[in-house]
Amino acid sequence: MADKPPVALENRGEGEDGRRYSPSAARNREPIRDVLAPLITAPARVLEIASGTGEHGAFLTSALPHLRWTYSDIDSDSLASQRAWQKADITGRLTGPLCIDASTGEWGEAEGLAQWDVVFSANMVHIAPWPAAEGLIRGAGRLLRPGGLLILYGPFARSGGIAPSNAAFDESLKSRNPDWGVRDLDVDISPRARAAGLELTAVTEMPANNLTVVFLRS
Ligand SMILES: C[S@@+](CC[C@H](N)C(=O)[O-])C[C@H]1O[C@@H](n2cnc3c(N)ncnc32)[C@H](O)[C@@H]1O
């Protein structure tokens, strides 16, 4: 049987207990924590879409004790790593993983778990076909409570402008999969978010020409 196509761009390490490690998550988890800490100050239930190795959830729940975090992904290897991180968790505030395909209009168990305070997704919008981003936005609009936040982390173009490093990255993404690519926050993402009841409220520049963007559910 042919190998399944990769879901990430890097070589991920794996420990004996099944927890995987991503070099990029190791680099960006602290800058992401520094943005989230002043933003989410009350107890919050976070649904993560496309949790990958599961490191962001593990690190951010340890760093921010008022977060309860639920993993999800579409990919079986990633789900297995998230299961291993959840098993190793000592905070008692990491749950899941749920199997969620963001591009669908039905997120299974996540639909029934009342309303979420935060939907968080890092590095999926550009490393998945566009319907995954559209579904992520629609799902956040559907499941966030009023006043809840959709938080995205990754590279974005802005109103047609793109940093040279992100333009090169976009080309390399498209050479791997023509359906992947750096999206434009103002042209592609924000109008769809607005239609889903989500207003862009904050954009924070992050290392390596990434952004953390925050949408507020009205
Ligand atoms: C580059 S990885 C990012 C993982 C992690 N969020 C991080 O930043 O390290 C992209 C992730 O998106 C997931 N993914 C791709 N398409 C998806 C979809 N339609 N629904 C949910 N997850 C998806 C992949 O399985 C993979 O775990």
Image: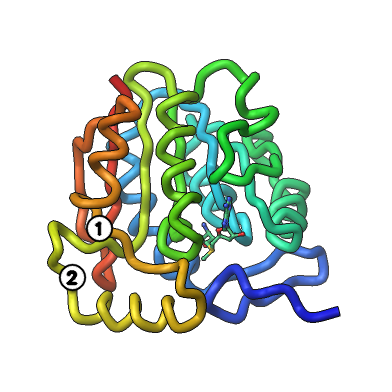
Q: Secondary structure at mark 1?
A: strand
In the picture of the structure, the residue carrying the numbered disc 2 is 162
Between 22 and 165, the one nearer to me in the picture: 165
| Quadrant position of the C terminus in the picture | top left
- 172 in relation to 181, above or below: below
Left or right of 72? Residue 24 is left
Task: Name the kind of residue labelled 1 in the image.
Answer: Asp
Circle 2 — which element?
loop
Badge 1 or badge 2: first in the primary sequence: 2
Q: Quadrant of the N terminus?
A: bottom right
Q: Foreground residue, 188 or 43?
A: 188
The reply, left or right, for residue 29 in relation to residue 97 is left
Residue drawn at 44 percent across, 55 percent down: 130
Count of numbered labels shown in the rendering = 2
The location of residue 11, given as percent across then percent down, is 60, 81
Could you tell me residue 159's position as x and y percent?
A: 13, 57
Tell me which amino acid carries mark 2.
Ile
Counting from the top left corner in percent of width and height, residue 96 is at 70, 39
Whether label 1 touches label 2, CB < 8 Å: yes
User: Who's the residue at 48% across and 50% down the image?
Assistant: 131
Residue 184: numbered disc = 1
Crowding at mark 1 (Cα within 10 Å: few <14, some 14-19, many 20+):
some
- Identify the residue at horizontal 38%, vertical 50% (top origin): 33
How far across and how far down the image is residue 80, in percent?
77, 57
In this rendering, would 73 be left or right of 170?
Answer: right
Answer left or right for 198 relative to 46.
left
